[in-house]
Amino acid sequence: MFFNSSLPDSWLISDFRENILVDFAPMDRMEKLNWDDLRVLSAVIEKQSLNGAAKRLQIDPATVSRRINRLSKSLGVSVYSKRADGWQPNPEIEKFLDLVNKFEHDLEVAITEMHSIQNALPQKIAVAAPAAVLTTVLLPNFEKLKERSPSIRLSLHRAAKLSHLGQNDLIVTALQPEQGRLMVQSIGKLTLEAFAPPDMKPENETQWIGGDGVEDPFCVENFGKEIFGTKPTHRVDTFADALQLMVLNGCPSILPRVVARKFKDDLVRLDSSRTKAVPLYLCYHESRRDDRSLRTVIDWIRETFVLEGALCKAKFPDPK
């Protein structure tokens, strides 16, 4: 049970050396026992050194020493005793140390089982994102999330102008929130470019399709004015609507590459040297940073952005 090697010199810090053999005042032992101290003791037993225990628990060696000292006072007997070969575990409390190790092991098993049960329950996560992100990035890759975590139930909502969570657990937005207790991460970019049907007539070259406010955070209108030299002739709510109208009336439009990618053979890039990259941000409340289900969804969203970004670059390479 006990390790034979002497404790390193770091055990011999002054407060430990001076206090470990003091007389113990009478007390109610069970009330004074602190699980954090027992956890430190368990780590010392496992790692067979003060420094090893400190590293495992991510605390400094002096704190480990103080906790062992406090535990000795609580027990009314020294956890370690001074011998000729250095500080050694007190053989008189071998049974107690066995109980500490068993309790920590049983506790870890119980926590693991609890998490397994929790993860098996349906976990509802509400996600809001621009329509282009939902329909061309997230939905096509939904099966990957389902395979990874079948218990998660996604609720997806269209929203392009979000600056706060509202009723959502996660948002993907082009507006970087500046206030509130939100964790804000850069998630990727939507690269905008001018596209046209292959049979576009000359008279349609300046009659382009713009947005009607829903996609405004992407600054489509300003970018389109730079390319076409005029305000949009037609307006629609989403990029998907713009794509459909392009096919019907032969006018050009500004589209994200991720939207145009699946229709590459039916579209013409008007000027691949002129693009606009719109940053996107993933946001959630800071109190949810350790939420396992939320973390699973976040990781999935990140992976889908990387995947779709690579596919877009392959379909629409930037000019050299």
Image (cartoon, rainbow, N blue to C red):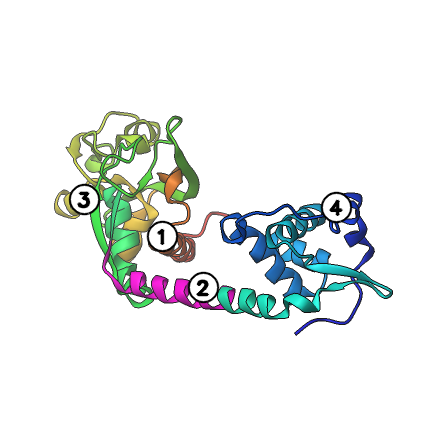
**Residue tagged by mark 4?**
19
Nearer to us of marks 3 and 4 is 4
Q: Nearer the viewer, mark 3 or mark 1?
A: 1
Q: CA distance from mark 3 to mark 1?
A: 29 Å
- Which residue is at the far left? 248
Range shown magenta: 104-123
Going from N to C along the chain, the mark reached first, 4 or 1, is 4
- How packed is label 3: few (under 14 Cα within 10 Å), some, or many (20 or more)? many
Cα–Cα gap, marks 1 and 2: 33 Å
User: What mark, if any, has residue 219 been given in the picture?
Assistant: none
In space, the residues marked 4 and 1 are separated at their CA atoms by 54 Å
Name the residue that disc number 3 marks.
Answer: 246
Q: Position of residue 155 (x, y in %)?
A: 20, 50
State which quadrant residue 202 falls in: top left
Please name the amino acid that badge 2 sits on: Leu
Inter-mark Cα distance, 2 to 4 = 31 Å
**Residue 45 lies in quadrant:** bottom right
First along the sequence among labels 3 and 4: 4
The percent position of residue 233, horizontal first and vertical second, equals: 17, 30
What's the CA distance linking mark 2 and mark 3? 62 Å
Say which residue label 2 marks: 107
Horizontally, residue 77 falls left or right of residue 309, namely right
Q: Nearer the viewer, residue 309 or 168?
A: 168
Within 10 Å of disc 1 (Cα), the crowding (few <14, some 14-19, many 20+) is many
Look at the magenta stretch and give its main secondary structure.
Answer: helix
Q: Residue furthest right?
A: 84
SS assignment at label 2: helix
Residue 219 drawn above or below residue 168: above
The answer to which of marks 2 and 3 sits earlier in the sequence is 2
Q: Mark 1: which amino acid?
A: Ile
Residue that carries the numbered disc 1 in the rendered image:
301
Can residue 281 be seen here? The reply is no
